[in-house]
């Protein structure tokens, strides 16, 4: 079932930024991510969905009903921001139940639902504390509980993990994904972090300069990007002209000179025979390493296990081979 449908949405800010005419469909129960570089329009689009920004043109339908002119507080959506924005003079439980209080939910029901929301985020014993007595990660958990307690029809996340340290960020990402699936809440999340998008999203939209470039499942977008912009933003560094790629892999006559060849870094193997190159750089990434290899006219990056990278040093000659089934062609 389609929960949200945006049609021909446009928004311009003083001729400095334009959210181009765009279409977007979000299905019930899915975790949908808007991803792109800073300034691409993803937060503006999220605010349009929330009702915090009114589009200049276009329509927004929620479960078949036009909500384009419906104010934010009547959309029954919940939003979680980069900062928790908790009321410092209220206890944790009072912060969580604030939305219920505004909706005139009876006190006994407010208390029950607030305690359940705190249990879901692992803070049931913190109900009587104040925000100043909590860590940054705990405050974000309270913010999440406050969003969940109103039982929203749509959960909107505006980079809520960006201010957390890596360990807390990892914990919050897994908690949100777990609760989203457990509760079946349709969720739209804004992020510029590719790793976060791949971890959380069922589907995602890659944006640039106010436009949606491509929509699909994370793995599909990574393995079959439509454009160079999508490929580059999702982490592909080996985007080669056809004549250059021919030095690494035999190309069929179906490959035209005006096409680009994308070779995933994990599809390039360092072996005993193949195309000769020289190691120019080694970048460790936890359990893997990115090895930059210079060929006669260009460089490529291969991803290898970190344990194997320790066998190489700068200036070493290596031989490269490519997994042919992993390459992808796009227009130049």
Image (spheres, rainbow, N blue to C red):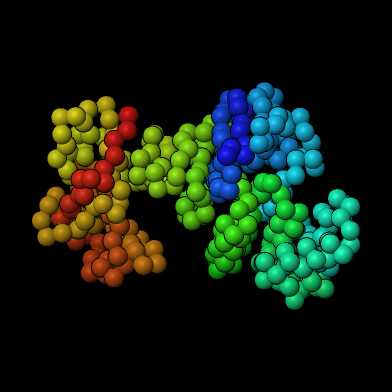
18 over 183 or under it: above or below: above
Compare residues 68 and 228 and report the one nearer the observer: 68
124 over 145 or under it: above or below: below
Q: Residue at x 49, y 45 (%)?
A: 203
Q: Residue at x 45, y 40 (%)?
A: 216
Q: Residue at x 30, y 51 (%)?
A: 265
Compare residues 186 and 24 and report the one nearer the observer: 186
- Judged left or right of residue 145, residue 239 is left
**Residue 44 in sight in this render:** no
- Judged left or right of residue 303, residue 81 is right
Farthest front residue in view: 1
- Judged left or right of residue 261, residue 108 is right
Instruction: Give the image location of residue 126, x and y in percent.
Output: 76, 74
Compare residues 189 and 191 and report the one nearer the observer: 189
Instruction: Give the image location of residue 61, x and y in percent.
Output: 66, 32
Instruction: Give the image location of residue 28, x and y in percent.
Output: 59, 44
178 over 16 or under it: above or below: below
Quadrant where the image shows the C terminus: top left
Compare residues 99 and 138 and report the one nearer the observer: 99
**Residue 152 in sight in this render:** yes
Farthest bottom residue in view: 125
Quadrant in the picture for residue 18:
top right
Q: Residue at x 19, y 58 (%)?
A: 270
Quadrant where the image shows the N terminus: top right
């Amino acid at each position: 079932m389609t929960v949200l449908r945006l049609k021909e949405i446009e928004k311009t800010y003083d001729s400095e930024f334009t959210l181009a005419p765009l279409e977007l469909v979000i299905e019930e129960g899915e975790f949908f991510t808007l991803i792109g570089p800073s300034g691409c329009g993803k937060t503006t689009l999220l605010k349009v969905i929330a009702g915090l920004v009114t589009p200049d043109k276009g329509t927004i339908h929620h479960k078949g009903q036009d909500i384009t002119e419906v104010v934010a507080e009547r959309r029954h959506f919940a939003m979680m921001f980069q900062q928790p924005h908790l009321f410092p003079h209220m206890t944790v439980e009072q912060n969580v139940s604030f939305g219920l209080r505004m909706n005139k939910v009876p006190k006994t029901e407010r208390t029950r639902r607030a305690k359940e929301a705190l249990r879901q985020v692992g803070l049931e014993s913190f109900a009587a504390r104040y925000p100043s007595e909590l860590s940054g990660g705990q405050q974000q958990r309270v913010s999440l509980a406050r969003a969940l307690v109103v039982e929203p029809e749509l959960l909107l996340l505006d980079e809520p993990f960006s201010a957390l340290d890596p360990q807390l960020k990892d914990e919050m990402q897994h908690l949100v994904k777990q609760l989203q699936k457990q509760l079946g809440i349709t969720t739209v999340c804004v992020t510029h972090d590719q790793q976060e998008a791949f971890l959380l999203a069922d589907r995602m939209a890659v944006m640039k300069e106010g436009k949606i470039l491509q929509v699909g499942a994370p793995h599909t977008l990574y393995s079959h990007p439509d454009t160079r912009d999508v490929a580059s933003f999702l982490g592909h560094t080996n985007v080669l002209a056809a004549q250059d790629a021919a030095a690494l892999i035999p190309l069929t006559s179906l490959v035209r000179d005006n096409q680009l060849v994308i070779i995933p870094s994990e599809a390039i193997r360092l072996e005993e025979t193949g195309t000769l190159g020289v190691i120019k750089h080694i970048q460790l990434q936890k359990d893997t390493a990115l090895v930059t290899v210079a060929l006669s006219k260009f460089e490529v990056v291969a991803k290898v296990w970190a344990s194997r990278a320790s066998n190489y040093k700068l200036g070493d000659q290596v031989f490269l081979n490519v997994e042919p089934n992993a390459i992808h062609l796009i227009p130049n």
